Amino acid sequence: MSCSHSKTSCLVQAKAYSFPRIADLPLFVTALFFSSTIFAQAIPSTVTVQTGDPKIVLSAPPTVSPANSGNAASLFTPITSSNTPQIYTKGMPSGATDMDLRQLWMELKLNNPQLSSLRESYLSAKATVPQINAPANPQVGLVWSGMPANSPFALGAANTPTAANPGGISSNNAISVAQPFQFPGKRSLASEIANTNAEALLAQSESIYLQLGAQLSTLYYGALAAQKQLQVLKESVVRLEMIKNVAKARYSNNAAAYIEYLNAQVSQSAAQADQFNVERQLQVALKSINTLVGRHSREQLVLRGDVRRAINSVPTLIELEDYAETSHPSLKSSALQLESARKGVTLAKKAYLPDFQVIGSSYTPRGPFSANNGAMFYQFELDLVIPLYFFTKERYGVEQAQRTQAAAEAGNISNRQQISLAVNSAYANYEQVKNQTQFLKERQVPQADAAYKVGLTQYSNNGQGFNDLLTAQTQLRVLEVQLALAESNLLQAQAVLLVTSGKEPF
């Protein structure tokens, strides 16, 4: 007897056959198992991104790394209408967008507002470097003297004899140009400190990028787990439909009680009700992913990826620790801050050295706005700006710089310890989740699947044990959901481990 999954009642079909034809039910079960296998095929892992803005090429996103610091000078041009930064959030496209994890990370790097703010802060800090390294502005002065009382400025009256002033007035006028200079090495060292601080800010932005990426990976694999749970629940509904049809057929032949059919129907409704909660969790995860990558939360997003194909072997703990010590952005930032603090001590000690000022003047016995009526002569002046008041400011400036260096050294050591501890903890968590996933995949789920198939076969061949069959089906569904969650947790632990070590999880 064959029985489809449509709404056609198997009870009517069962009445057309005699009772011994129930032995043909295993053929029906085999066909349904074949259809369930086709239904549970894996999701493809390679997709093509279709975004609403065709000008954005995700294959070459703006890289946030020290390697691009040399190109920052091209960004220091004045802001015009052509190079004004655009808003880092895009409008809602008309169609859905398919993305895998790598493409989501690229979208995160390109469009996340927090990362965009950090990039602009880095470029702002880099813009201060040429300002600090530039020479001090010169001073131009205009001087005229010898003005008598009641003759303000005496403009245009140079050396004009009068009864009150037989010798003339405004007899010593000058034009001067003053140029201050710092002691050699001060300005260049200050610009180096500013540049080091800017690179430390860039390293901090890379660390924030990895943290946001770990959050994105967690949401991504959680959403894939929700998709897998929906698939498991749909398969469970199909299995319960088979049990329900067998119960109806047996009831029509007076071989089972009607309560068995009702119990199977109740279990099927419970599995369908569980789909509503999982669908809500999936929608929340998709909205969170959209917001994290700088898209509108209501944009349509389809996640593509094969969870089992994404489970790869990770490096050893020693390799991850070595990589973190040499390449983690947070450790780069703390090392750059320590370097900046050491240069700050050197700069503070240079405060004991005097600065200079050179003044060149041109004198002539005329008014500033009158014709020249005398010989012109010149004057050169060299001034020293020396530390005074018993080096009070300089002494405390050196002490402040030294204490800043000590704080940076302690912070660098603490940061290294925290990174090493985080790598060890993430690796231990990864190993634990990996063992749990392997145990579910290799032992518990196959055992539950075998128990369900044996129970269904026995019950289909006019055997007893309906409650055992229902229990086996429920246990199989629970273990399959647990396996989906365990695989998701394994990938999340894998991503967190790699991110904690300073790597991207792909």
Image (cartoon, grey):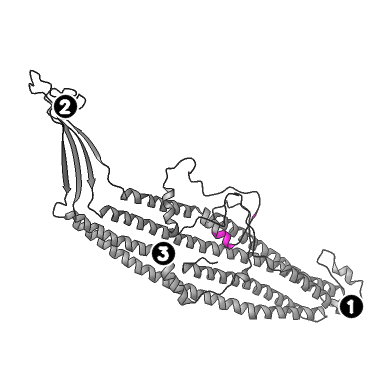
Q: Between 352 and 274, which is closer to the camera in this rendering?
A: 352
Which mark's residue is nearer the viewer, 3 or 1?
A: 3
User: Horizontally, is 318 left or right of 194 in the view?
Assistant: right
Does residue 455 belong to the magenta stretch? no
Residue 21's label in the rendered image is 1
One can see residue 207 in this view: yes
Where in the figure is residue 339, as x and y percent of width and height? 32, 62
Residue bearing mark 2: 366
| Residue pictured at 38% horizontal, 49% vertical | 127
Q: Residues under labels 1 and 2: Cα distance? A: 131 Å
One can see residue 397 in this view: no
Amino acid type, residue under disc 1 in the picture: Arg
Locate the C terminus and report the quarter of the image it occupies. bottom right
Mark 2 near mark 3, Cβ–Cβ under 8 Å?
A: no
> Which element carries disc 1, helix, strand or loop?
helix
Q: Magenta stretch?
A: 82-105
Does residue 91 belong to the magenta stretch? yes
Q: Between 67 and 490, which is closer to the camera in this rendering?
A: 67
